[in-house]
Image: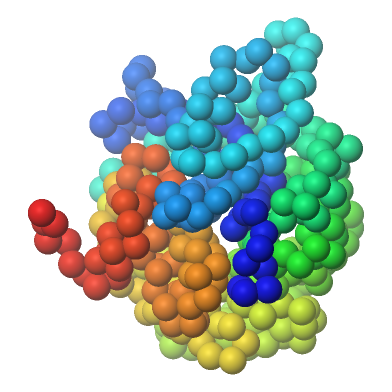
Amino acid sequence: MSETASKKYAMIIPTSMGIRLTPENAQPFHCSDTFKMQATSAESNVASVASYLGLPVKVLTAFVKDSPISHFIKDNIRSRRMDFEGPEFEQGGPWGFRHQINMADSGLGSRGPRVHNDRAGEVGCELNAKDFDLNRIFAQEGAQIVHLSGLIAALSPKTSQFCLDIARIAKENGSLIAFDLNYRASFWEGREQELSAAFAEIASRSDILIGNEEDFQLCLGIKGPEAGGKGLDEKIEGFKEMIGRAKTAYPNARWFATTLREVVSANAHLWGALVTDSQDWEVIKPREIGVLDRIGGGDGFVGGLLYGILKGWDVQKCTRFGWASGALATTMLTDYAQPADEEQIWSIWEGNARVKR
């Protein structure tokens, strides 16, 4: 990362911030009357690993002017040690703009979690390059890594163009592009041709591509592993073959990553990961982890992986740190990891849950 060391920010993320409502005491949402409210987005969840470990992060987003929810979100971003900027949109009356609402319980034991998203009128759908000084942000301030998510790239036609504009100018100014594909069928319905073209261009400019088998197949048209009742080793080899095809299609990308998850119960998962830097592979076969709330575990993995890349670590160290960052996130009531320090994350990797005095 020496060629980008002079840049002001370690990471810049475009995102649409919202709130999450979570029932107390691991209860189902539909029969609860008391909820914890938190500010959230998948992309800010990723960046939190770096920000809590002391690296400078900037959030590009949009707000509803004079909204108490916007105030709450801004305070939360500041508490995560992140800078932010973005336009303020007039609400436009009770039926105008607002921030998304994520209604999600955490599940318990044999009862899996349920998530319901309410994104009507979401202000983040208005993200547009004209509302940002992208030349200042990327040519003057600069970012070592720009993290883009398929959730934002597919949110609306405006956000698709916004992500394309960011990918273009960030790449021109020497940033690495990380793209977490994050396919969502409801976002793609009726927009398949448009989004396929947008995702292909972003992927062509990306240095780091992250996604599961479905993501690579449905977002980028990469042939997936052969179907069938295969064991873990065969599935891993099938994924490696798929990544080989993705590398041929997108030769600019160097890093490819995915997680492996098997659900034993809502509170016990088998957690693994596969990462390559196009030279070496690191494969972590699923290991059992305790889960308080699974939401954000994948984002924690990506955040830890990107932190390792920012630090210049090799593929083995990056993958293990990402695995442990994801495991940390699943132990927290927030849906983002808040590491105290690197040692805490490495202790999780080492399986050392002893008290530290």
Looking at the image, residue 325 lies above or below residue 190: below
* Direction front: furthest residue: 6
x 59%, y 58%: residue: 10
Find residue 335 and report its image quarter.
Answer: top left
Q: Nearer the viewer, residue 120 or 301?
A: 301
Q: How is the image coloured?
A: rainbow
x 31%, y 31%: residue: 27
Count of marks overlaid on the render = 0
Looking at the image, residue 286 lies above or below residue 19: below
Dividing the image into 4 quarters, which one contains the C terminus?
bottom left
Find residue 31 and report its image quarter.
Answer: top left
What is the x, y in percent for residue 232? 42, 82
What is the x, y in percent for residue 299? 50, 55
What is the x, y in percent for residue 245? 72, 85
Looking at the image, residue 350 lies above or below residue 28: below
Looking at the image, residue 330 lies above or below residue 281: above
Q: Is residue 52 visible?
A: yes
x 84%, y 34%: residue: 131
In the image, taking residue 119 as reference, residue 137 lies left or right, namely right
Dividing the image into 4 quarters, which one contains the N terminus?
bottom right
Q: Nearer the viewer, residue 320 or 290?
A: 320
What is the x, y in percent for residue 144? 65, 63
In the image, taking residue 24 as reference, residue 214 lies left or right, namely right
Q: Is residue 167 visible?
A: no
* Direction bottom: furthest residue: 279
Find residue 18 and report its image quarter.
Answer: top right
In the image, taking residue 105 as reference, residue 248 lies left or right, namely right
x 45%, y 30%: residue: 38
In the image, taking residue 86 as reference, residue 232 lies left or right, namely left
